[in-house]
Image (cartoon, grey):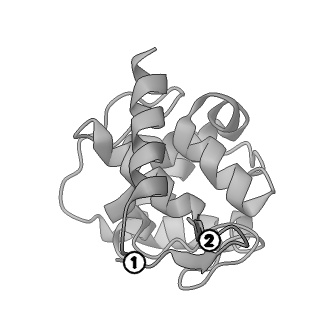
Amino acid sequence: MKLKLITGVALSVVLFSCGGDAAKEATTDGAIKEEVKVEEVVEVVAASDGALSKGVGPITSITLGEIDAAMVETGKEVYKTNCTACHKLGKRSVGPALKGVTERRSPEWIMNMILNPDVMVKEDPTAKALLAEYLAPMANQSLSEDEARSILEFLRTKN
């Protein structure tokens, strides 16, 4: 119930706010129609409770330390093999650009999206909004937690 309330408030704020980068046009009856990007709604919803969502899945907590160079190299290879068909680092593709994703999403959310994409797009509000925007669900690559963690470490170097 709380999530529905937060989502409703966030959508209202975004849809009825003035200014910003949203495209506006006058309708035939003189009202202003405002187009809002799904990503803007996702960011407002994610920020509305003061913390980034951890998503839905097996990862409930991650403690990050210094960047692990060996893990980055492993993650780079796993990323090339499993992710590049749909994700580019610096531009939109079948899926969202992943450059800076570690600044927009929590480490737990990223790993849960990698490990548990089927449930995430059904239950996580951010994943649902991304599915609505990109129209293609993230494929489950059946990666291990270690592989997902190495991808996360690689993405930490791409901000």
Dot 2 lies on which element? loop
The amino acid beneath tag 1 is Lys
User: Residue 16 in the image: x percent, y percent?
Assistant: 44, 55
| Residue depicted at x 62% and y 48% | 129
| Circle 1 residue | 158
In the foreground, 95 or 78? 95
Tag 1 or tag 2, which sits nearer the N-term?
Answer: 2
Pointer 2: residues within 10 angstroms few (<14), some, or many (20+)? Answer: few
**In front: 158, or 130?**
130
Rendered residue at 23%/41% (across/down): 63
Residue occupied by mark 2:
30
Judge left or right: residue 17 versus residue 78.
left
Q: Of the residues shown, which amino acid type is indicated by label 2? A: Gly
Left or right, 8 with respect to 97, comes to: left
Q: Is residue 17 above or below residue 111?
A: below
Checking the image for residue 35, the label placed there is none
Q: Tags 2 and 1 in contact by the CB under 8 Å rule?
A: no
Asked if one can make out residue 116 in the rendered structure from this viewpoint, the answer is yes
Compared with 142, 6 (above or below) is: above
Query: Percent position (x, y) of residue 99?
Result: 46, 76
How far apart, in angstroms, are the residues tagged by discs 2 and 1? Answer: 45 Å
Judging depth in this view, the residue of 70 and 25 nearest the camera is 25
Q: Quadrant of the C terminus?
A: bottom left
Residue 120 found in image quarter:
top right
